């Protein structure tokens, strides 16, 4: 068996992010004109590197580029050579190489400038890559490992202004752990790097543990002498043992230089030869005393005259840190409460007044600064630091609603996918993916549907059911459309587009009949085609009418800017052309053998007077291409037979591209698209010289014949296909994508452009006129999120009732009732005053985890502030029944007595008295530190009442360990209780043990059954107890005769490293009639599929394509592709579809070279890639 692996949704979580002007578009000129906002954000998401840019018009984040590097990105840094106008990106990864990338905006891709090998691949303790620091003046960079090794590279440029890099200089120190690394800003003096280090040589040698207790963290400065080309360890000073993060302080004339050292509860300012300046981090008033406050993310904002730091704590609170300094002497360090946002793994402040927060879990956000924290707020300062016998005096504050920041955009993130199920609960064409994501109060159950999200701008009801809609401009140079024309069965309605959309009667359009086509002709005249003729409306208001001969009527129309072809009843074609004076002239007639089913004219090529090709669809299941050249007008050039009569035709012209925003090279192409009556979309390439058709592709879209309409998406021609659901065909990063839209069936559509909505679609469906925009192109799924109260652990779908049962639990939090009580108490204590002062304002309105469409006035959402923290040994947990259709929670049971739900399943016992029951495994008083302890485990049995909307406890059974896995088996309940597998039956008061197996070596975490077999997964690989006595590992468990021991009862047939921790796996088909795939979800929020190949020929083709791509297009970060996919075991019989899908983004000559090696054309390879993708989604 061979599998094809394809990532359907790339990882959405973020590991690290940096900002820089990677496109180099912020030169002095643009800075002077005030458009210096061309800063991009580089975000690392596991093995994906993304480049985002905030759109200056809409304020939304746009993904410029997303590239899979087939390696683990561990750190990012940006630098700029002195005098240059663009930034380079440095990537530390698991490849054992340092890679410097340059973004090429013209080709929209990252080019590798340098790749320096320094160690083994893989994330290892002593191989650099985890920590990265660059001198602020771009003269040197230091890349370090967690332990021992640090390498310094000198950066420079050659005569041609190209970046050069020196050999590495070593700054190693054995037996030393590095916690954080940064570069000091010391102007143009020798570069200095600072690190927080801990030496453990003494602790290793001392068996008593005394030395380990006395180990001291050090702040170490390394100086790179540019003259001697040598790195020396300049100074090493003891530092607070809670230190975890260093932040560079501006220097070289802009500030005092040095570093901020972020410690547990404190921030210190340190520099060589400067006394320590210390201030305490304000803490939340409701934080238990046992918990410290750690800084987890930092961002610096620099302006000519000032600078400040924004530091975020592990609870999400952001503090603004200011330094009072004269020259290089710091006199005071002030920490002021700024705002609270969800905890971020990285924060970036852009010069345009935006803050990007890459969230640790849940959606990422873009904020705009309303203020920079100038108002009075809770503040602690080094000047007011008080030391008492118990330590330093803390400063308290209460979080408040956002004051200095306002959220303007959000990027959806599934990280982490805790559990996933695929089912069609809504009876749609395609199944939905239900994923439990997030952590704590930001948890959600998300419903993913394949398709693009739309956002509706307007909807208005019409007097009757329309049959078609068009938009037209008055002049070809207008930016916006002037009219929306709606055709009904016997009238035509004209609406003008302005501030509002209203009906007009002076447009010169004929409104007493239905219309067949409305379009702009030439530069400034309008044309309306109706059954009895053509109405040509000139710019000066003159109207020319062409009437149909005799009793014939017009049935079909095809037109472009200068040419019109009509088909009369009986099959006669008449061809018109616009002459130099702007008149519409009849040129040629032609009788077809039967009625014409549909017509389309190709767009006029640039610099030409006419287009050469007319496509005619006939009811005899053929499509003909006719010539429109004066020499052989309406003569056939080629014929294509299709599987069913064509319903609609559309030519789509693809402009030639050399990289650009598309990131791909391809020549200009003309595609003919046909919607057939059997619901298939047929696509073929038209030769631009001869008109011959080649490279045909087809795809089933739905039960209705697709109608095709042109539209504009991200400034390019695209195609709307309206079948039983709407589809959009567009080009994204070199791929032609055909993706469904997540909306109801539409009847007719046209592109729409106005002042308020520059790129939208106007459509009619039923008796409604809808205007919408299409969101986030290139994404596979659009999602609906239902908020949850705690971290979801597992869920099950109740198929008959179509409800979902979710178990949620969190450690170290208060239950909903306790939070509600605390909220009331605080409100009463403060007299419910709301004067916005953080000391006595409304402290926490985040009471009861108001997730289910919280009260409108709740200004204090828990998703933003997190829950109040309780003692770390407390658990809160609940069981929820959800109706996914209405998104309502029909039942919510909070568990009492410090119990946490850990497993769930539905079970039908032999005794049919209660029907389907819900079994939930819980653990009471579970602790992991200092060692794992447990007060007890339970299995609760609930019965469904109120038609499955609610739960009633039948009984609970105590067990001696945590029941981490439950599963129904032949009318009984299987439970994995610790390392024991047990079979229970239902009793009156509790569950009854029927049999058990105690021979499993490790804790059981999953149970699956198939017919009469049981498959059990345990927590980790089994390692024999007897390996110590037998170093060869010969006498392993299976030789002891236990469990019918045998070396392997299953044979490994495929192995593949997906690059992430897989949390859920299911076999399902995502398209109607498609093959079954294995669908998986991961911790980083990606969703992928593995499809089994059906033919040996495909296996050979794709394995050869993969082999050529490995050689010709090695991964960006220097990781060997084969080694990456074989990270733990050699890759076996799986072809990497993500690598194969990079083929369209290669330069055209490389595409041809690989195609020649495979004895194919590039078009055939692209068709193969498209076909296999269409089998999956």
Image (cartoon, grey):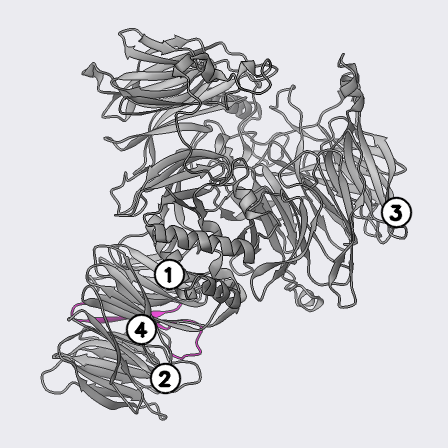
- The residue nearer to you, when weighing 577 against 395, is 577
Binning the other alpha carbons within 10 Å of mark 2 as few (below 14), some (14 to 19) or many (20 upward) gives many
Q: CA distance from mark 1 to mark 4?
A: 15 Å
Q: Which mark is residue 1167?
A: 1
Q: Nearer the viewer, mark 4 or mark 2?
A: 4
Is residue 359 highlighted in magenta? no
Q: Nearer the viewer, mark 1 or mark 2?
A: 1
Q: Work out whether mark 4 precedes mark 2 in sequence or the reverse, and give the earlier one.
A: 2
Q: CA distance from mark 3 to mark 4?
A: 75 Å
* Residue on which disc 2 sits: 522
Q: Work out whether mark 1 precedes mark 3 in sequence or the reverse, and give the earlier one.
A: 3
Residue 87 position in % (x across, y down):
68, 58
Q: CA distance from mark 4 to mark 2?
A: 29 Å
* Residue on which disc 4 sits: 693
Binning the other alpha carbons within 10 Å of mark 4 as few (below 14), some (14 to 19) or many (20 upward) gives many
Q: CA distance from mark 2 to mark 3?
A: 69 Å
Question: Is mark 1 in CB contact (under 8 Å) with mark 4?
Answer: no
Q: Nearer the viewer, mark 2 or mark 3?
A: 2
Q: Work out whether mark 2 precedes mark 3 in sequence or the reverse, and give the earlier one.
A: 3
Q: Nearer the viewer, mark 1 or mark 3?
A: 1
- Furthest residue toward left: 551
Residue 812 seen:
yes
- The residue nearer to you, when weighing 606 against 1164, is 1164
Q: Which of the image's four quarters has the N terminus?
A: top left
């Amino acid at each position: 068996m061979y599998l094809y692996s394809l990532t359907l949704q790339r990882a959405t979580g973020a590991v690290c992010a940096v900002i820089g002007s990677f496109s180099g578009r912020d030169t002095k000129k643009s800075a002077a004109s005030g458009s210096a906002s061309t800063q991009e954000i580089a975000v690392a998401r596991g093995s994906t590197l993304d480049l985002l840019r905030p759109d200056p018009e809409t304020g939304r984040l746009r993904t410029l580029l997303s590239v899979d590097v087939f390696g683990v990105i561990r750190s990012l840094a940006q630098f700029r050579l002195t005098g240059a106008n663009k930034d380079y990106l440095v990537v530390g990864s698991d490849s054992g190489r340092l890679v410097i990338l340059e973004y090429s905006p013209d080709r929209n891709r990252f080019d590798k400038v340098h790749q320096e090998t320094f160690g083994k691949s893989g994330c290892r303790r002593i191989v650099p890559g985890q920590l990265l620091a660059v001198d602020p003046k771009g003269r040197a960079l230091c890349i370090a490992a967690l332990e021992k090794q640090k390498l310094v590279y000198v950066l420079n440029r050659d005569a041609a202004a190209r970046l050069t890099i020196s050999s590495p200089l070593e700054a190693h120190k054995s037996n030393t752990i590095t916690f954080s690394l940064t570069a000091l800003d010391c102007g143009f003096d020798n570069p200095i790097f600072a690190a927080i280090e801990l030496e453990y040589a003494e602790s290793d040698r001392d068996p008593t543990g005394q030395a380990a207790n006395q180990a001291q963290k050090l702040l170490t400065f390394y100086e790179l002498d540019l003259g001697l080309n040598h790195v020396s360890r300049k100074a090493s000073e003891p530092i607070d043992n809670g230190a975890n993060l260093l932040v560079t302080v501006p220097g070289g004339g802009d500030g005092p230089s040095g570093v901020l050292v972020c410690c547990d509860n404190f921030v210190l300012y340190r520099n060589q030869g400067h006394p320590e300046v210390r201030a305490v981090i304000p803490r939340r008033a409701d934080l238990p005393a046992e918990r410290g406050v750690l800084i987890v993310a930092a961002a610096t904002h620099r302006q000519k005259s000032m600078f400040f730091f924004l530091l975020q704590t592990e609870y999400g609170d952001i503090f603004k840190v200011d330094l009072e300094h004269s020259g290089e002497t710091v006199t005071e360090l002030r920490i002021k409460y700024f705002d609270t946002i969800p905890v971020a793994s990285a924060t970036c402040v852009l010069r345009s007044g935006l803050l990007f927060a890459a969230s640790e879990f849940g959606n990422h956000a873009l904020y705009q600064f309303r203020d920079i924290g100038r108002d009075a707020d809770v503040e602690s300062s080094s000047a007011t630091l008080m030391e008492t016998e118990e330590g330093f005096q803390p400063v308290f504050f209460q979080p408040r609603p956002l004051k200095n920041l306002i959220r303007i955009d959000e990027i959806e993130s599934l990280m982490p996918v805790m559990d996933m199920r695929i089912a069609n609960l809504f009876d749609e064409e395609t199944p939905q993916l239900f994923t439990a994501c997030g952590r704590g109060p930001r948890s959600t159950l998300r419903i993913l549907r394949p398709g693009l999200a739309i956002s509706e701008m307007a909807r208005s009801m019409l007097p009757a059911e329309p049959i078609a809609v068009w938009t037209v401009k008055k002049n070809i140079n207008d930016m916006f459309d002037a009219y929306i024309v709606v055709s009904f069965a016997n009238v035509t309605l004209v609406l003008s587009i302005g501030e509002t959309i209203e009906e007009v009667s002076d447009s010169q359009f004929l409104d007493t009949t239905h219309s067949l086509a409305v379009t702009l002709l030439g530069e400034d005249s309008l044309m309306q085609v109706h059954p009895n003729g053509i109405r040509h409306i000139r710019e000066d208001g003159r109207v020319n009418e062409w009437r149909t001969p005799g009793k014939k009527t017009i049935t079909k129309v095809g037109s472009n800017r200068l040419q019109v072809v009509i088909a009369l009843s009986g099959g006669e074609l008449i061809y018109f052309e616009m002459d130099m004076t702007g008149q519409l002239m009849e040129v040629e007639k032609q009788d077809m053998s039967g009625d014409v089913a549909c017509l389309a004219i190709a767009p006029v090529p640039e610099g030409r007077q006419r287009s050469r090709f007319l496509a005619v669809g006939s009811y005899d299941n053929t499509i003909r291409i006719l010539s429109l050249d004066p020499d052989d007008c309406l003569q056939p050039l080629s014929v294509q037979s299709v599987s069913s009569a064509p319903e609609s035709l559309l030519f789509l012209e693809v402009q030639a591209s050399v990289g650009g925003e598309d990131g791909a090279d391809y020549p200009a192409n003309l595609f003919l698209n046909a919607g057939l009556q059997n619901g298939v979309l047929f696509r073929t390439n038209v030769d631009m010289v001869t008109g011959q058709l080649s490279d045909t592709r087809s795809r089933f879209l739905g039960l209705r014949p697709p109608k095709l309409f042109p539209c504009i998406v991200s400034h390019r021609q695209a195609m709307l296909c309206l079948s039983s659901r709407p589809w959009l065909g567009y080009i994204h990063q070199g791929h032609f994508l055909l993706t469904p839209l997540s909306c109801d069936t539409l009847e007719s559509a046209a592109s729409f452009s106005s002042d308020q909505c520059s790129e939208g679609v106007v459509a009619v469906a039923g008796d409604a006129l809808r205007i919408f925009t299409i969101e986030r192109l290139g994404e596979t799924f659009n999602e609906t999120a239902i908020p949850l109260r705690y971290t979801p652990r597992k869920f099950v779908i109740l198929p008959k009732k179509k409800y979902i049962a979710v178990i949620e639990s969190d450690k170290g939090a208060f239950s909903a009732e306790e939070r509600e009580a605390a909220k009331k108490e605080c409100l009463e204590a403060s007299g419910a005053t709301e004067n916005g002062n953080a000391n006595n304002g409304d402290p926490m309105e985040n009471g009861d985890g108001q997730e289910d469409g919280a009260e409108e006035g709740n200004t204090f959402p828990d998703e933003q502030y997190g829950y109040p923290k309780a003692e770390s040994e407390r658990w809160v947990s609940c069981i929820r029944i959800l109706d996914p259709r209405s998104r309502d929670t029909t039942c919510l049971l909070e568990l009492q007595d410090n119990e946490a739900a850990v497993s769930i399943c539905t079970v039908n016992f032999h005794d049919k008295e209660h029907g389907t029951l819900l079994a939930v495994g819980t653990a009471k008083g579970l602790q992991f530190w200092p060692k794992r302890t447990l007060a007890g485990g339970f299995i609760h049995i609930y019965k469904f009442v109120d038609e499955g909307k609610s739960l009633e406890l039948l009984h609970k059974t105590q067990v001696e360990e945590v029941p981490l896995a439950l599963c129904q088996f032949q009318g009984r309940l299987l439970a994995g209780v610790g390392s024991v597998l047990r079979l229970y039956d239902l009793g009156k008061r509790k569950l009854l043990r029927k049999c058990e197996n105690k021979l499993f070596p490790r804790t059981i975490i999953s149970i699956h059954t198939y017919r009469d077999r049981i498959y059990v997964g345990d927590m980790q690989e089994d390692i024999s107890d007897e390996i110590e006595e037998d170093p060869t590992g010969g006498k392993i468990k299976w030789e002891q005769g236990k469990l019918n021991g045998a070396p392997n009862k299953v044979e490994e047939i495929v192995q593949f490293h997906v690059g992430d921790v897989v949390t859920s796996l299911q076999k399902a088909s995502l398209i109607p009639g498609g093959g079954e795939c294995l669908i998986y979800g991961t911790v980083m929020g990606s969703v992928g599929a593995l499809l089994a190949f059906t033919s040996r020929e495909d296996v050979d083709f794709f394995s050869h394509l993969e082999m050529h791509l490995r050689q010709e297009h090695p991964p960006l970060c220097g990781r060997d592709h084969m080694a990456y996919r074989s990270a733990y075991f050699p890759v076996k019989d799986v072809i990497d579809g993500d690598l194969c899908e990079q083929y369209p983004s290669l330069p055209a000559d490389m595409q041809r070279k690989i195609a020649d090696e495979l004895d194919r054309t590039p078009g055939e390879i692209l068709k193969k890639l498209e076909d296999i993708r269409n089998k999956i989604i």
